[in-house]
Amino acid sequence: MINIKIILLIPLVALIVILLPRLKNKTFYRLMLVAISGIGILFVLFPSITDRLAHFVGVGRGADLVTYLFMIFFFLGGVILYSKIRKIEADQTELVRKISIQNAEKLNNK
Amino acid sequence: MQLSFEPKKVFIIIPSYNEGKVIADTVKPLIKMEYTVVVVDDCSTDNTREALAGLPVVYLKHDINLGQGAAIQTGLEYALEKNAEYAVTFDADGQHNYEEIPALLEPVINGRADIAMGTRFKRQEDIANVPFARKLILKGAIIVNGLFTGLWLTDAHNGFRAMNRTALSKIKLRENRMAHASEILSQVKSNHLRYEEVPVKIIYTDYSKLKGQSSMNSINILIDLLLKKIF
């Protein structure tokens, strides 16, 4: 039991240690990072919490509840990332368009 | 039909991606008619630019491949900026007939429409010309477009269009890939642009069939349309 706890804790702690200093001026993301990793660490250290939560919302096992929550967050994350990519694509398009119009050339003048 | 217009003020927008083999043949008759020819090179990796060397065309180059919708929008913005009176979108692969440009322009020049859209489903001889599989997919696309945009046309994905400055200033394509064909319709509708369909002949050559969209791509277009509704 101790071994799996260590394996699971390493990435969670690493996430905080590595990402927290990088997210300068992004208070919201920093808080989210600490909150989500913190909850993860808590669940790893005290799995019985998830069982109690699971019973409370009517799910059989704590591990099942964690799986369901993971699916929701994974999907949400995908949606958020996708809308960001669309925004970046739109900006990139504007930029490429601007450059191409600025550099318009008449090919017979060469 | 007597039409008076200055060909130089008609900008022919040709979005082009790896059409080096045919692009010169496509633009030469347009140059002869003294139109202003604008080729938008969507980051081709072939000899498109060399093929056009020495020809009096305006060459716009995307430094990143963005898609046909984006290329058309670049051409339209250039036309607007350079005070074009009319803009015509024209396929690079030789599918469109340059002799039909005046007929397409007619409703726009005579003030009946802000945008004229070519259709291959009005004249019997044009309909007979469309390969069966294409017909099936296009009919499906017409229904999808109708449901999405509220505009029920006879042809859904015809790249042959003519517009005046009102349409030029109103239409702003954000769908970079092929879903722009539906996007144009929804913007025609939302901007209350007057439109007319003009029968045109689509020339299906072996080359254009090979280079044209594969039928599977219609599924991608549908997905793009759905995503646009969501985001």
Image (cartoon, grey):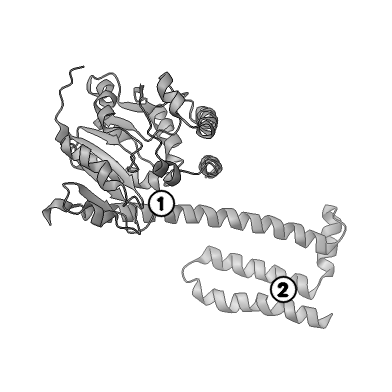
Extreme top residue here? B1
The residue that appears at 24% across and 42% down in the rendered structure is B27
Residue A96: image location, x then y, percent: 32, 55
- Left or right, B56 with respect to B191, comes to left
Residue B8 has which mark? none
Residue A44: image location, x then y, percent: 77, 73
Which residue was labeled with disc 1? A90
The amino acid type, in three-letter code, at marker 1 is Ala
- Left or right, B41 with respect to A15, comes to left
Residue A48: image location, x then y, percent: 85, 69
Residue A71: image location, x then y, percent: 71, 57
The residue that appears at 85% across and 63% down in the rendered structure is A51
Split into 4 quadrants, where in the image is the N terminus of chain B?
top left
Residue A41 has which mark? 2
Extreme front residue here? B206
Element class at badge 1:
helix
Element class at badge 2:
helix
Q: CA distance from mark 2 to mark 1?
A: 38 Å
The amino acid type, in three-letter code, at marker 2 is Ile
Observer-nearest of A109 and A29: A109
> What chain does badge 2 belong to?
A
How many discs appear?
2
The residue that appears at 31% across and 47% down in the rendered structure is B22
Place residue B200 in its image quadrant.
top left
Indicate whether B157 appears above or below A102: above
User: Which callout, 2 or 1, points to the residue nearer the camera?
Assistant: 1
